[in-house]
Image: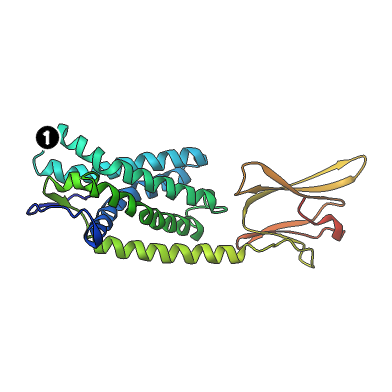
Amino acid sequence: MATASAHPHDHHAMPTSGGALTRVAISATLHCLTGCAIGEIAGMLIGTALGFSNLATIVLSVLLAFVFGYGLTSLPLLRAGLALGAVIPIALASDTLSIATMEIVDNTIVLAVPGAMNAGLGQLLFWGSLAFSLAVAGAFAVPVNRWLIARGKGHAVVHQTGIHGGLPPRVVGVLAVIAFIFGASVLLATALDSSPAASDGAHGARVDDTFEAFDLAYGSSRSMGPFARVTLHSRRTSAPSLLMTAAPPGRQTYVDHHHAYVESFSTRDAIGVV
């Protein structure tokens, strides 16, 4: 809920109802979202760059979200002179449920977006899905923090120390709004671009960009004679999908933008996703 800078302030009672409570809950959520976002983004970057499985990437992201969330709450308290033994229970009480809520929502959204978990670091879908999911996750955490603060828990525990730090909530709020708009725009554009893309016109079969790689193999059999087989590796599932088998073999495959094309099969009925 805080970053490296800390500043004590005059202690005053926390609101327990109404708009004042909601404003405090939003402020607390934005502080908490800072550490959560840093950890989540770091985990996704590391997992994607190192080729981790989806499960390993999610586990790493969740762990780092908690590490950074707790860490950014603890640093201002430690720098203000509080003992580590006193800081740990404060961080656990103030952040745990808020971070857990954001991580559940964030990762659920990322898993639900087709291709998001397998998108590369250079693709807008990676950054768009992550930005959108974090912004929405923060919105889901607001009522959780409001409920906690009204009962003297959550951010109220940190407030009792009189020590706060971090980026101003308005700055984080503006960044969250920008992230939501950017992410929603990317997901909308991706959805519009993901209409059925298989075609059997003059340029052969087009496979939409939910497929990230494909293998082309040539062979021969007694029943078919020479054949070409194209196997696609989907971003939606871990299992490869057989696109087509045709005789005689195709002559050319290539990748153009985000779409894979297979050309020059002699029979139109040989082209089609199966």
Q: Whole-percent x and y of residue 34?
A: 29, 52
Q: Position of residue 157 (x, y in %)?
A: 19, 44
Residue at numbered disc 1: 83
Among the 4 quarters of the image, the one containing residue 74: top left
Residue 135, placed above or below residue 64: below
Disc tally is 1
Closer to the camera in the image, 29 or 187: 29
Taking the spot 39% from the left edge, 62% from the top edge, the residue there is 179
Near-viewer residue (178 or 159) = 159
* Element on which disc 1 rests: loop
Applied colour scheme: rainbow
- Specify the quadrant of the image occupied by residue 178: bottom left
Check the image and report above or below for 85 versus 260: above
Residue pushed farthest front? Answer: 17
- Residue at 34 percent across and 61 percent down: it is 176
Answer with left or right where residue 125 lies relative to residue 74: right
Q: Nearer the viewer, residue 254 or 160?
A: 160
* Left or right: 52 as drawn, with respect to 162: right
Closest to the observer: 149 or 274? 149
- Who's the residue at 16% across and 48% down the image? 159
How packed mark 1 is, by other alpha carbons closer than 10 Å (few <14, some 14-19, many 20 or more), is few
Residue 134: percent from the left, percent from the top?
39, 54
Q: Dividing the picture into quarters, in which one does residue 198 lie?
A: bottom right
